């Protein structure tokens, strides 16, 4: 009789593992990706944020050394989500306000940026399709 409860417990654990592995993996991946991306931007780790940009965008518009150096001239002080909406095609559109301080002048301003996120079924991950935020004042 003692084998039957063990078998039942093993089947229950296997069933729960099967249910949890498929359910919620896409939303969980989105939450994790958005957390990592916002942290990378917030802490001025633009190289890490760049790795979360869609490879097609990175190929079409490579990040130059000049652009990377311009990004290093600012300090991000805030990363605040203003709005988020799921688009009809399943992509996620987000409006974000960034607090930006010029390291040379110490002038602070707020920049609003749009992020679009798409899920890549093959890679099983989310990609940001708008590129890094444009923070230069002359644009």
Image (cartoon, rainbow, N blue to C red):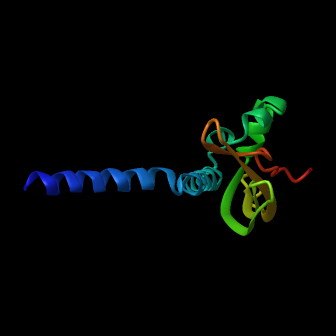
For the point 65% across and 52% down, the residue is 41
Residue at the image point whose x is 62% and y is 45% from the top: 45
Percent position of residue 100, x then y: 74, 59
Q: Quadrant of residue 68?
A: top right
- Which of the 4 image quarters holds residue 66? top right
Give left or right: position of 50 versus 14.
right
Work out which quarter of the rendered image holds the N terminus and state it: bottom left
Residue at 73% of width from left, 62% of height from top?
A: 98
- Give percent across and percent down for residue 15: 36, 53
What residue is drawn where x is 58% and y is 56%? 35
Residue 12 seen in the current view: yes
Pick whichever, 25 or 49, lies toward us: 25
Can you tell which quarter of the image residue 80 is in?
Answer: bottom right
Horizontal side of residue 130 vs 52, given as left or right: right
Q: Would you say residue 95 is visible in this rendering?
A: no
User: Residue 19, image x and y in percent?
Assistant: 43, 55
Give 47 or 121, whichever is nearer the viewer.
121
Tag count in the figure?
A: 0
From the viewer's perspective, is 116 left or right of 26? right
Residue 83, position as x, y percentages in the image: 75, 69
As rendered, which of 102 and 90 lies closer to the eye?
90
- The image shows residue 100, relative to residue 40, as above or below, that is below
Above-or-below relation of 61 to 126: above
């Amino acid at each position: 009789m003692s084998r039957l409860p063990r078998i039942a417990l093993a089947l229950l654990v296997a069933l729960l593992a099967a249910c949890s592995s498929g359910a919620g993996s896409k939303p969980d991946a989105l939450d994790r990706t958005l957390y990592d991306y916002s942290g990378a931007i917030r802490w001025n780790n633009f190289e890490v944020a760049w790795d979360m940009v869609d490879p097609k965008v990175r190929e079409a518009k490579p990040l130059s050394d000049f652009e990377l150096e311009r990004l290093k001239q600012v300090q991000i002080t805030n990363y605040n989500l203003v709005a988020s909406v799921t688009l009809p095609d399943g992509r996620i559109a987000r409006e974000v306000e960034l607090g930006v301080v010029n390291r040379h002048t110490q002038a602070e301003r707020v920049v609003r940026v749009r992020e679009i996120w798409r899920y890549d079924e093959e890679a099983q991950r989310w990609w940001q399709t708008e590129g890094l935020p444009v923070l230069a004042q002359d644009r």
